[in-house]
């Protein structure tokens, strides 16, 4: 029975250590998600220096979190840990997509491949917002690069054909990205056609005004006089 007590005490010590690490990981994962969200927000505001600073803080927080989990794979592969690392990948990829900086690798971020791919899918989805911002500003041509990024990420991800148990549910994320991509493509196409029509009408009006100062008004007067 003395041996049993020793075993139980050893187990208690191990579980206490694991619980402490778990609590610390939960705090760090929440901090990591916050830093990544603020970085993405800064990129949307074109505050790229602030975004880079936040990414540096996020990398440091992630490195500390991962180091404590080196010998605890059961905690490393839990949902909250991988979700935080996914946010880390997403934030870095959003920054790289928008600024043209080199793309980080999973190894550079110490993020598992499957988690990185899911973060990439979400980063590509973020490009829709940038494309819509350009459309709202009447700069449709500047929305095209963001659409191209989405298209390229989707084209690459559909080549990853492995079970969800290996990819962490990437197939569902890819399907979501496809829907966002198609909506964005439709928005960009519609806006491009509207812009082309606007330019054509403006050119027509210019030609009419150049041919005769009152030609435009005469034309519309004749249209108004047509019998219904």
Image: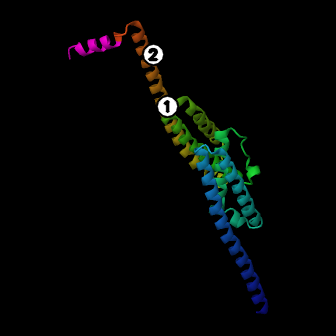
Q: Nearer the viewer, residue 202 or 169?
A: 202
* Image quadrant in which you'd find residue 79: bottom right
- Mark with earlier residue (1, 2): 1
Q: Which residues are magenta?
A: 216-228
Question: How is the rendered protein coloured?
Answer: rainbow
Taking the spot 71% from the left edge, 40% from the top edge, the residue there is: 101
Q: CA distance from mark 1 to mark 2?
A: 18 Å
Residue, disc 1: 138
Residue 39 versus residue 25 in the image, above or below: above
* Image quadrant in which you'd find residue 80: bottom right
Taking the spot 52% from the left edge, 30% from the top edge, the residue there is: 140
Which residue is farthest top? 211
Residue, disc 2: 203
Q: Residues within 10 Å of mark 2 (few under 14, many from 20)?
A: few
Q: Is residue 218 magenta?
A: yes
Label 1 residue SS? loop
Taking the spot 71% from the left edge, 59% from the top edge, the residue there is: 62
């Amino acid at each position: 029975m003395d041996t049993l007590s020793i075993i139980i005490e050893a187990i208690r010590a191990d579980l206490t250590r694991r619980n402490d690490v778990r609590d610390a990981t939960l705090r760090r994962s929440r901090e990591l998600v916050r830093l990544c969200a603020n970085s993405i927000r800064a990129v949307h505001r074109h505050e790229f220096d602030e975004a880079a600073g936040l990414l540096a803080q996020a990398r440091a927080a992630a490195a500390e979190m991962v180091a404590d989990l080196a010998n605890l794979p059961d905690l490393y592969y839990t949902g909250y840990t991988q979700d935080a690392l996914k946010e880390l990948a997403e934030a870095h990829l959003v920054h790289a997509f928008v600024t043209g900086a080199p793309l980080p690798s999973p190894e550079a971020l110490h993020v598992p491949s499957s988690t990185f791919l899911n973060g990439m899918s979400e980063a590509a989805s973020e490009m829709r917002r940038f494309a819509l911002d350009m459309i709202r500003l009447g700069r449709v041509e500047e929305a095209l690069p963001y659409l191209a990024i989405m298209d390229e990420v989707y084209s690459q991800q559909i080549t990853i054909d492995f079970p969800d148990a290996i990819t962490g549910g990437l197939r569902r994320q890819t399907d979501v990205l496809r829907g966002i991509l198609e909506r964005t493509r439709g928005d960009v196409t519609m806006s491009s056609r509207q812009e082309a029509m606007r330019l054509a009408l403006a050119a027509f009006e210019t030609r009419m005004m150049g041919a005769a100062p009152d030609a435009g008004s005469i034309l519309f007067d004749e249209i108004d006089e047509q019998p219904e």
